[in-house]
Image (cartoon, rainbow, N blue to C red):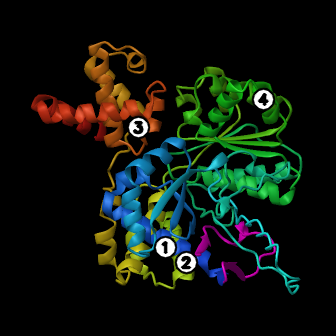
């Protein structure tokens, strides 16, 4: 039996040795600690093949959030954060993923996608011990010998013995996102200073600024700082009750509590925390947002620290109640601006150093400079650029050079005057162009004079922003992602059939990008 687990040593079973001998029948099976590293390398190669095969957009939509949990015998176990993603990948992409794995290991026969519970991306893995076989009745006094452990199919288990102060009580905390790994520069130095001060104060049972609201466009380090605060406080005082939640998980917990008639328990759980960290605030809406407002008020009154992150200033969070926006604005609002060249260079250099330490490859200074100058969007694209160069080097054996970077990073390179288009800009433009009030575009009205502009707006949001289908649906009045997908495909067909409409939509695109 082949067995390997995803994740580092910190996720290994306590007390495990570097190599363990088990049996399958009469044959010994060696399980090495090196297998985890080989599994990560295998998964990186598979991801690179998938991205090359399906393209950046499809990969980001369906594959980017998958994680390899384990490879046992001939079955690959992957995990996904939502039931829909599990079902969709299993139904539509299992064969493609299987083909990508078989390029490395022809013995792989099946793909199994399971749900990640509570957003934890890397559960602990534990083998299930087989029941000892009953000795035959006629057997005579066998020689005493310690029986080897016989393993059957391993099962996924999660450690639910977390201490009261464990930050994993909410969404999963990324162990890589600490203050030590945060790359500082002029664009984020104020946010970093505030985050460090919050962590120090919370560890010493004091509150300085409350609430704190950190905002920036995507990929500039908001989530990293929230994770770093949780890590720092937890390290300083493990008894602290820390909860980190994305807006999605906040809504999920609240809705589940209501359905199970345990809303009171959910409220009490939140209001007992010492430190509450909420990410992606812009996605919070409906009754969940109202409940957050009540929780915020209670925590502030009780001098409990609250830190929130979003992609826009509080005043621009139009899906949030005015009272909540006012409370957030009344605390400390900290922006993170776009990265300058020096900070981009520092980020690329840090990621390149990490790749060099792990894989032994060399990143020449001209390549570092080229990536920092060419990829100007945000930090995640810089990380992605380094990952692509690593994958290209690993898969083709080609040295990392500027020509390789030019060939590999084409779709990440933006012109310096490119304008970031927001969904709010699209709503305003479509509303003005078609003379339909913005609130009508977000409403449930189904009349033709509203439906068509709404579909066009959704199409433009998918074409001109990096938002996922569920994110776009939430911004359009809380619609399901399938509604957005239907609208996108509908408009794509209309563009093929109607030249005049195609020109009209192209004009809207140019106006939004100017």
Asked if the stretch drawn in magenta spans residue 20, the answer is yes
**Foreground: 226 or 132?**
132
Residue depicted at x 11% and y 29%: 500
Q: If you read the primary sequence from the N terminus, does the residue marked by circle 4 or circle 2 appear first? A: 2
Q: If you read the primary sequence from the N terminus, does the residue marked by circle 3 or circle 4 appear first? A: 4
Q: If you read the primary sequence from the N terminus, does the residue marked by circle 1 or circle 4 appear first? A: 1
Classify mark 3: helix, strand or loop: loop
In the image, which is nearer the foreground, mark 4 or mark 2?
A: 2
Q: If you read the primary sequence from the N terminus, does the residue marked by circle 2 or circle 3 appear first? A: 2
Mark 1 touches mark 3? (CB < 8 Å): no
Q: Residues within 10 Å of mark 2 (few under 14, many from 20)?
A: some
Give the residue at mark 1.
42
Classify mark 4: helix, strand or loop: helix
* Relative vertical location of residue 494 with respect to residue 208 in this rendering, above or below: above
Give the residue at mark 4.
267
**Foreground: 168 or 88?**
88
Task: Specify the segment rendered in magenta.
Answer: 1-26
In the image, which is nearer the foreground, mark 3 or mark 4?
A: 4
Residue 300 appears in the picture as rendered: no
Q: If you read the primary sequence from the N terminus, does the residue marked by circle 1 or circle 3 appear first? A: 1
- Between marks 1 and 2, how big is the CA–CA gap? 6 Å
Asked if the stretch drawn in magenta spans residue 109, the answer is no
Q: Residues within 10 Å of mark 4 (few under 14, many from 20)?
A: some
Give the residue at mark 3.
422
- Between marks 3 and 4, how big is the CA–CA gap? 34 Å
Mark 1 touches mark 2? (CB < 8 Å): yes
Residue depicted at x 66% and y 67%: 152
Residue 33 appears in the picture as rendered: yes
- Between marks 2 and 3, how big is the CA–CA gap? 41 Å
Give the residue at mark 2.
38
């Amino acid at each position: 039996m082949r067995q390997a687990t995803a994740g580092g040593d910190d996720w290994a079973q306590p007390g495990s040795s570097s190599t363990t001998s088990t049996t399958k029948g009469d044959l010994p099976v060696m399980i090495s600690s090196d297998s985890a590293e080989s599994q990560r390398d295998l998964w990186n190669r598979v991801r690179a093949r998938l991205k090359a095969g399906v393209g950046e957009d499809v990969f980001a939509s369906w594959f980017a959030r998958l994680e390899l949990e384990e490879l046992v015998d001939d079955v690959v176990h992957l995990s996904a954060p939502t039931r829909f993603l599990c079902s969709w990948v299993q139904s539509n992409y299992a064969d493609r993923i299987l083909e990508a794995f078989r390029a490395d290991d022809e013995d792989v026969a099946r793909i199994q996608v399971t749900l990640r519970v509570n957003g934890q991306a890397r559960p602990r893995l534990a083998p299930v011990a087989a029941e000892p076989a009953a000795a035959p009745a006629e057997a005579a006094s066998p020689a005493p010998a310690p029986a080897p452990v016989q393993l059957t199919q391993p099962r996924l288990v999660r450690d639910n013995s977390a201490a009261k102060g464990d930050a994993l009580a909410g969404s999963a905390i990324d162990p890589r996102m600490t203050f030590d790994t945060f790359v500082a520069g002029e664009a984020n130095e104020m946010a970093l200073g505030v985050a460090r001060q919050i962590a120090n104060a919370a560890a010493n049972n004091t509150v300085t600024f409350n609430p704190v609201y950190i905002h920036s466009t995507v990929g500039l380090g908001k989530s990293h700082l929230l994770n770093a605060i949780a890590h720092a406080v937890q390290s300083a005082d493990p008894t602290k009750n820390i909860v980190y939640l994305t807006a999605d998980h906040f809504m999920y917990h609240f809705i589940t509590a209501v359905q199970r008639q345990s809303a009171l328990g959910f409220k009490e759980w939140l209001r007992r925390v010492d430190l509450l960290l909420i990410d992606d605030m812009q996605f919070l809406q409906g009754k969940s947002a109202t409940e957050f407002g009540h929780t915020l008020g209670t925590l502030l009154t009780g001098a409990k620290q609250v830190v929130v992150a979003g992609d826009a200033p509080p005043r621009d969070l139009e899906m949030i109640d005015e009272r909540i926006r006012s409370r957030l604005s009344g605390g400390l609002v900290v922006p993170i601006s776009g990265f300058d060249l020096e900070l981009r260079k520092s980020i690329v250099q840090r990621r390149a150093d990490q790749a060099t330490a792990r894989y032994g490859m060399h990143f020449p200074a001209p390549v570092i400079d080229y990536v920092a100058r060419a990829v100007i969007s945000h930090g995640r694209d810089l990380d992605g650029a380094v990952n692509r160069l690593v994958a290209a080097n690993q898969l083709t054996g080609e040295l990392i050079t500027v020509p390789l970077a030019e060939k590999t990073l084409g779709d990440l390179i933006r012109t310096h005057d490119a304008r970031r288009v927001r969904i709010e800009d699209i709503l305003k433009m479509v509303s003005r162009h078609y003379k339909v009030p913005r609130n009508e575009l977000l409403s449930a009205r189904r009349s033709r004079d509203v439906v068509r502009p709404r579909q066009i707006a959704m199409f433009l949001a998918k074409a001109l922003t990096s938002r996922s289908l569920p994110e776009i649906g939430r911004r359009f009045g809380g619609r399901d992602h399938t509604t957005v997908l239907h609208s996108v495909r509908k408009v794509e067909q209309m563009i093929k059939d109607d030249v005049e409409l195609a020109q009209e939509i192209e004009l809207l695109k140019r106006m939004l990008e100017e």
